Image (tube, grey):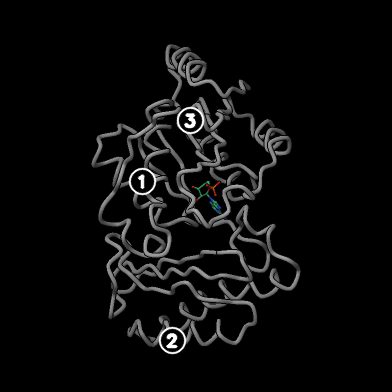
Amino acid sequence: MVVTGSIDKVREVIREARKKGKIVGFVPTMGALHEGHLSLIKAARRDSSFVVVSIFVNPVQFGLKEDYRSYPRNFKKDIELVKKEKIDLLFYPPAKAIYPDGFSTYISETCLSRALCGKSRTGHFIGVCTVVAKLFNIIEPDIAYFGQKDYQQARIIKKITKDLNFPTKIKVLPIVRERDGLAMSSRNIYLNSKEREVARCLYSAINLAKKLIKKGERNSRKVISKMEELMKSKKRVEIDYIEIVDADELNDLKRIGGRALIALAVYVGKTRLIDNIIVNVK
Ligand code: AMP
């Protein structure tokens, strides 16, 4: 496994792999790796003959009041985990390599980015799109892997890949959950034991929505109110949003039909957690 922070070295190693006819699979991450990340790496290992993982806590996607400085970083453990997965290349650049002095070019997806998390995290998706576009230009992957956990992000990446003619195929993999249903996230370690306990309510709310829809409820407002009710019964929980939108364009759905995304973002204490589910309704 090659471990490097140098863009030139990455290009050189990938050029050599390509000469040997390798298929390059790429998993971008911000590190503090968990089973969710590993599921993407395992998928890459299955599909491709050369697996690249990046670990980069991207300063540009964090708001001023967000947790860039305190974001969990655990490079030693991460390196052991990716070694076990037998990846070929770990790209671990310093911020200055990605954003040198004078950097002034940003990628902005202007439609899907306005929905859901885009409303409360101004500029977040500009940061995400910019770093992903840069990583795609550096690595030139055949396939790149993203998690449904960040559904909106994956949807936007698919859009910029198409709009900007990146030749990369985007694969989106299911949410990996803890035993009690909480979606795995690097940020879960911020939760104290009380908060960890109430954090299960995100998954409970999703299951409640699923149940109501299965029973025939099609009115989004009614489903959302029930989810809100469940959340409001919990201490230390503050809803950022609960929305039901169509899964492709992320437009509000008044009546639930077709491929619908039920997405929520919730503060548990100071930690912002997200979760979602897609339901297919005839
Ligand atoms: P992050 O390190 O949080 O930027 O995540 C890197 C990639 O892992 C993104 O594509 C995430 O959607 C994905 N990911 C994070 N958590 C999970 C999870 N619980 N299940 C599946 N994929 C995940």
Residue at x 49%, y 68% (from the top left corner):
265
Q: Which mark is residue 225?
A: 2
Q: Residue at x 62, y 23 (%)?
A: 3
From what the image shows, is residue 147 above or below residue 54?
below
Q: Which quarter of the rendered picture does the C terminus lie within?
A: bottom left
Mark 3 or mark 2, earlier in chain: 3
234 relative to 176, above or below: below
Question: Which residue shows up at 49% across the image and 53% down it?
Answer: 64
| Amino acid at dot 1 | Ile
Q: Which residue appears at 30% of the width and 57% of the height?
A: 112
Disc 3 target residue = 48
Q: Secondary structure at mark 2?
A: helix
Q: Position of residue 99 (x, y in %)?
A: 45, 32
Q: Position of residue 76 (x, y in %)?
A: 73, 35
Q: How many marks?
A: 3
Figure check: 101 above or below 240: above
Rendered image: mark on residue 157: 1
